[in-house]
Amino acid sequence: MKRPHSKKSGQLKEIALERINELFSQAEKVFRKSPDLADRYVELARKIGMKYKVTMPRQHKRRFCKHCYTYLVPGANCRVRLTGQKVVYFCHKCRNYMRFPYSPAKTK
């Protein structure tokens, strides 16, 4: 028999999202001193998101490698290129590409 959803689940998701945001801001602050710690923060944020079934915000999804889960900083440990209708991120650690669609701004 299924249990009814508790009213707390919405509150837990909000708290989880706040924690994910805080972990990514901490990863950004600490990256220059300790990249391994920044990677650990990304790992924790992913685990929180999976546990509470929270969709990771778009700005955070593009800040870590989908293959090795490294915190990415363009110019430091990843390369960003625009090709056609895609933004291509290249991770220097695992040497894999990630492609995200985008539509260029239309000029009049």
Image (cartoon, rainbow, N blue to C red):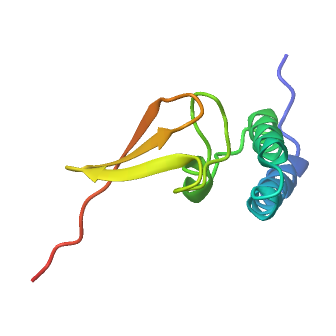
Q: At 81% from the left edge and 41% from the top edge, which residue is drawn?
A: 36
Q: At 54% from the left edge and 37% from the top edge, which residue is drawn?
A: 92
Query: Can you say which quadrant of the picture contains the N terminus?
Result: top right
User: Does 21 sit above or below residue 46?
Assistant: below
Query: Can you say which quadrant of the picture contains the C terminus?
Result: bottom left
Tell me residue 39's x, y (percent).
76, 42
Tell me residue 41's x, y (percent).
82, 46
Does residue 68 appear left or right of residue 16 in this picture?
Answer: left
User: Does 40 sit above or below residue 96?
Assistant: below
Q: At 58% from the left edge and 38% from the top edge, which residue is drawn?
A: 65
How many callouts does the rendering have? 0
Outermost left residue:
108
Q: Quadrant of residue 14?
A: bottom right
Outermost top residue:
1
User: Does 52 sit above or below residue 103?
Assistant: above
Does residue 82 appear left or right of residue 35 in this picture?
Answer: left
Q: Nearer the viewer, residue 60 or 69?
A: 69
Does residue 89 appear left or right of residue 102 in this picture?
Answer: right
Res. 74 visible in picture: yes
Tell me residue 46's x, y (percent).
74, 39
Res. 7 visible in picture: no
Tell me residue 61's x, y (percent).
58, 48
Q: At 78% from the left edge and 53% from the top edge, which residue is drawn?
A: 20
Outermost bottom residue:
108
